[in-house]
Image: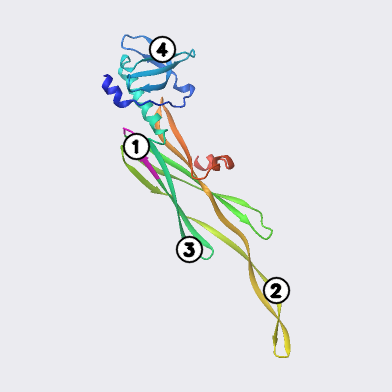
Amino acid sequence: MKYYLFLICIVCTMSSTAKEFRIFTDKEGRMIQAKIVKCDPRSGKVTLLRDNGTKATVPAAIFKDSDVSYIKEWMSASQFQLNSKFRIKTDLDKDKVDDKTTAITYTVQLENKTNMLIEGLRVEYAIFVRVAGFNGEKDSEKIYTGALDFDSIYHGQKKELTTAKEELKETYKAYTYQDTESDGYYSYTVTRTGQKKMTEDKISGIWLKVYGPKAGGEQIVRDFTDSRGLDEKYTWPADKFN
């Protein structure tokens, strides 16, 4: 039993919520209300935070089978939260359509380096675009959103999916002006046309919410951004995913 627990546990901690407090029952029927804060493979012990604020470190093998299953669930969720164990990566691809339009897509890669199958993986994404204004136009923002279903990823497996194709545009305003030309001894006025750039779309970055395994019935969600401070500058557009 201790060897089995060695396989399912690694030294790590996981952010906990009040909902993770549960009743643990040992094989003799004794119960405590607590939540897991650490699992140590070297000793085969689990550290529990009790509802009275005290901690207890006990062999995981003392608990009944359903609690051991919960420990496995907790460990899957905790490994999912570690970038060294579950990696998230994005790559931006740009394709010039014409002088004023560029098509963009992001490739989202998930890599499972945990020691277990991670199931039910889903990614919601928001691509933030700053619309820079010129010649009196104000700056504004665009947000492109979507979702990618990765389903399951085995240990050691990488999986890639691509976001929907969007477009970055430049807009221009036509104007006319008078110019003078000469032909020998004669000068005359001609009307010419030109264009002024009014707006230009510029990518600020992509924000992912990666929905992973559940712990205690609550799904664990990881946030990922490809630009530092993106999640501080912008607000996640939750209304786009209702």
Asked if residue 170 is among those painted magenta in the image, a careful observer would answer: no
Given the image, on which type of amino acid does mark 2 rest?
Tyr
Rounded to the nearest whole Å, what is the CA distance between mark 4 and mark 3? 63 Å
Q: Which residues are magenta?
A: 109-116
Residue at the spot x=55%, y=43% of the render?
230
Q: Nearer the viewer, residue 46 or 188?
A: 46
Residue at the spot x=48%, y=24% of the render?
17
Question: How far across and how far down the image is residue 43, in percent?
Answer: 33, 19
Rounded to the nearest whole Å, what is the CA distance between mark 3 and mark 1? 38 Å
Q: Is residue 111 above or below residue 191?
A: above
| Earlier-in-chain disc, 2 versus 1 | 1
Residue at the spot x=40%, y=22% of the render?
38
The residue wearing badge 3 is: 97
Rounded to the nearest whole Å, what is the CA distance between mark 4 and mark 1? 33 Å
Q: Tell me the quarter of the image containing the N terminus.
A: top left
Identify the image quadrant of residue 158. Answer: top left
Left or right, residue 2 beside residue 236: left
**Numbered circle sitting on residue 113:** 1
The residue wearing badge 2 is: 177
Q: Is residue 25 above or below residue 227?
A: above
Question: Closer to the camera: disc 2 or disc 1?
Answer: 1
Given the image, on which type of amino acid does mark 3 rest?
Val
Question: How far across and how far down the image is residue 60, in percent?
Answer: 33, 17
Rounded to the nearest whole Å, what is the CA distance between mark 4 and mark 2? 84 Å
| Earlier-in-chain disc, 4 versus 3 | 4
Identify the image quadrant of residue 44. Answer: top left
Any part of residue 127 in sight: no
